[in-house]
Image: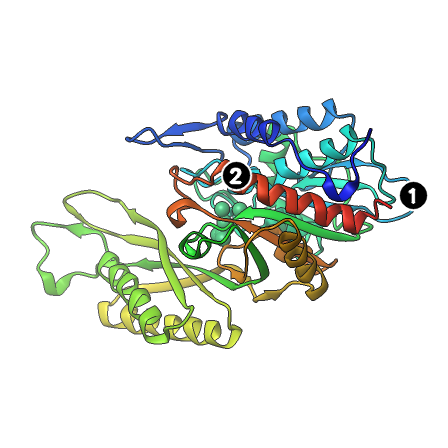
Amino acid sequence: MPRAADELQVDGGRLHGRLEALGEIGAVQGPNGERGSSRLALTDADRDGRDLVVAWMRDLGLLVEIDRVGNVFATLPGAEPRLAPVMMGSHVDTVRAGGRFDGNLGVLAGLEVIETVMANGLRPRRGLTVAFFTDEEGARFAPDMLGSLVYVGGMGLEDALDVRAVDDGSRLGDELDRIGYSGSVPVPGAAFPHCYVELHIEQGPILEDAGITIGVVEGVQGISWTEVTFTGRSAHAGTTPMHLRRDPLVAATKVAGFVRSLTEELGGDQVGTVGRFDVQPNLVNVVPSSVTMTIDLRNTAESVLQEAERRLAAFVATVADEDQVAATSRSLARFEPVDFDPSMVDLVEATALRLGHTTHRMPSGAGHDAQMLARVCPTAMIFTPSVDGLSHNIAEYTAPADIDAGANVLLQVVLDRADVG
Ligand code: GLV
Ligand code: MN
Ligand code: MN
């Protein structure tokens, strides 16, 4: 007998098995046995991860579609095909030394929801779609959330295909062709989903510290990525007197220190990170010729984020002047803070409480595909705790019981929205 929809539960063992199997692709190990993954967007490892997930989608008999920017959608049709489907999803690319849950959980939990619905003989009125979006991390091709941004019409396809990789300069469109993921479905999507729900690990310490199982995500903070290049004059380290140097590395390190003090001055939620630093020619006995660095600024308040950007730009100009180096800046990513749909947020909270979980309403500190989907349909996210608040780290971990809790909240939210009848 099929179980009543509101008692349905996912198969945690099957979900954990898939998380493990996907995590083994591009596996990286830490010195203390930590097990992470390295699948930068559109690399061979990303292709292999995609292929595994697509094979699982096809095994379930889902309709698999790939769009022109490589986003993948797998759909279980609903009883009423003219109704827009409920979409779940996230991403399967990782940062260079990433964890096994970031993104992967939202995709594989979505697949698990669909398999649970099928295994229990349910036929919702709306279809169920699970998606994974191209290049969510933005670590190889900026901006982050690139695939979902193109999907919702926030970036032109040709501009996206022309983005160059930070590591080897390859063109995104060429890399999509190379790994076999240049699909034929047009972007932006012709019809958007009825709603979108993304399960994700928190990637921070709040839930664990408070002993809470389910984070009810109310929105995502604003993100500003800037790349600054200082160009000075390459010179001999032994013979060039200090007063004759035009050293871009000295300027760049001042900016790195400034970013930290800026966050302290602005206080509150302001965070700032210098994550990439390329020094040329990067040799022991040569005054550098140029340094390219990135600055990641985030805040839940758009006005404060703008203030942080203004102060950073002013400081870069001042330092360049003082140190007699040239400075150029370009924006790699800029997204305003996003509020999720209140009725979707309420549904996540009510569902988690009904299932007996503790809940906490919170903004997301990380960027997510959900913040792009929020432009085109009612959207919400569900967070599960991250051990030690760690993510973008191979030690990233979420306990199986917390994963099951999050996946069951996802299942029940989706059943509600898909009108299981
Ligand atoms: C994506 O993971 C981001 O928040 O940078
Ligand atoms: Mn993620
Ligand atoms: Mn990430």
Q: Where's residue 255, x and y in %?
A: 30, 64
* Position of 220 relative to 277 (above/below): below
User: What is the three-letter code of the residue carrying label 2?
Assistant: Ala
> Label 1 amino acid?
Glu
Residue 98 at what x, y percent from top left? 43, 39
Residue position marked by numbered label 2 in the rendering: 401
Dot 2 or dot 1: first in sequence order is: 1
Residue neighbourhood size for the residue with mark 2, other residues' Cα within 10 Å, grouped as few (<14), some (14–19), many (≥20): few
Checking the image for residue 80, the label placed there is 1
Give the residue at x 33% y 71%: 262
- In the picture, measured across the screen, residue 184 lies left or right of residue 168, that is right
Looking at the image, which residue is at 54% across and 25% down?
Answer: 21
Viewer-nearest residue: 261 or 108: 108
Task: Give the number of the disc on residue 285.
Answer: none
Please state which of the two labelled residues, at mark 2 or mark 1, is closer to the viewer.
2
Report x, y in % for residue 279. Answer: 29, 48
Asked if residue 155 can be seen in this view, the reply is no
Residue 275 relative to residue 76: left or right: left
The residue lying at 67 percent from left, 48 percent from top is 158
The image position of residue 152, as x and y in percent, is 71, 54
Display coloring: rainbow
Q: Secondary structure at mark 2?
A: helix
Q: Measuring 63% from the left and 52% from the top, which residue is drawn there?
A: 352
